[in-house]
Amino acid sequence: ANVGNLFEVPHFSTDKFAVASPLAAGIGLSLVSMHVLAGHPIVMLRKFDATELLDTYAREKVTIGHASFTIFKRVTSHPDLQAFDLSALRLFSGTGSTGGETRDGLLRLRQNPTFTGRFYTGFGATEAGGRVTYLLPDDCDAALADPAKA
C-alpha cells in the first residue's frame, strides 16, 4: 500500500531504508524520522564503508538508499559496483552537489545490470534540519539524458 508521497516520490509499506549517514547531522536524523513515521524497517550501519553499504543493499533487499555527496562518490566509484545485486533498490537519493561528478556517478550506477531504480536529490539538509529543495526523479532523468537540463 502506498503510505504517502514525499513530494511526488512514492513510499510504500513494503519499503526498507538503509542509512549510513551520521545521525548527528540534520539529514541523517530527518531521514530516519521520516521512514520511522512511514513504518519502514530501517537498516543502520555503525559506520560508513562503501563495500558494506553495497553488501547491505543486496543482502537486506533495501528499496530506498540515501547518500551524502561523499558517501555517494565512494559508492559510485566502487571498483566492483557492477557486481552487487541492486535489484531491490528502487529509489536512491543523494544530498549535495549536482555537478558533473554526480551525473557521472549516477550513470555508473545505472550501468549496474541489476539496478533499475530512480534517483532524486535534495538540498538544505544540515542548515534546515531536513531537505527543503528537491530534484524529483523526472528532473534527474532529464538531467541524465541531457546535461543542459541539469
Image (cartoon, helix red, strand yellow):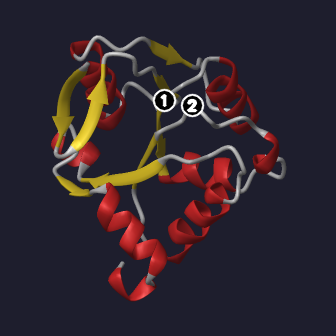
Q: Is residue 16 above or below residue 104?
A: above
- Could you tell me which residue is drawn at 57 percent across and 31 percent down? 88
Q: In the rendered view, does 108 fall on the left or right side of 34?
A: right
Q: Position of residue 143 (x, y in %)?
A: 40, 75
Which is nearer the eye, 79 or 118?
118
Q: What amino acid type should be assigned to the residue bearing mark 2?
A: Ala
Q: Which label belongs to residue 43?
A: none
Residue underneath mark 2: 88
Residue contact at pointers 2 and 1, CB within 8 angstroms: yes
Which part of the image, by quadrant, shows the C terminus?
A: bottom left
Which is nearer the eye, 3 or 20?
3
Q: In the rendered view, does 134 fall on the left or right side of 40?
A: left
Q: Is residue 92 above or below residue 54?
A: below
Q: Position of residue 8 (x, y in %)?
A: 19, 46
Q: Quadrant of residue 10?
A: top left
Residue underneath mark 1: 63
Q: Residue furthest bottom?
A: 148
Disc with the residue nearer the chain's start (2 vs 1): 1
Q: Position of residue 62 (x, y in %)?
A: 54, 25
Secondary structure found at label 2 = loop
- Could you tell me which residue is drawn at 18 percent across and 36 percent down? 5
Q: In the rendered view, does 134 fall on the left or right side of 86?
A: left
- Could you tell me which residue is drawn at 23 percent across and 56 percent down? 134
Q: Position of residue 112 (x, y in %)?
A: 71, 52
Q: Is residue 43 above or below residue 20?
A: above
- Check disc 2: other Cα within 10 Å, few if <14, some if 14-19, many if 20+: many
**C-alpha distance separating marks 2 and 1:** 5 Å
Secondary structure found at label 1 = loop
Q: What amino acid type should be assigned to the residue bearing mark 1?
A: Thr
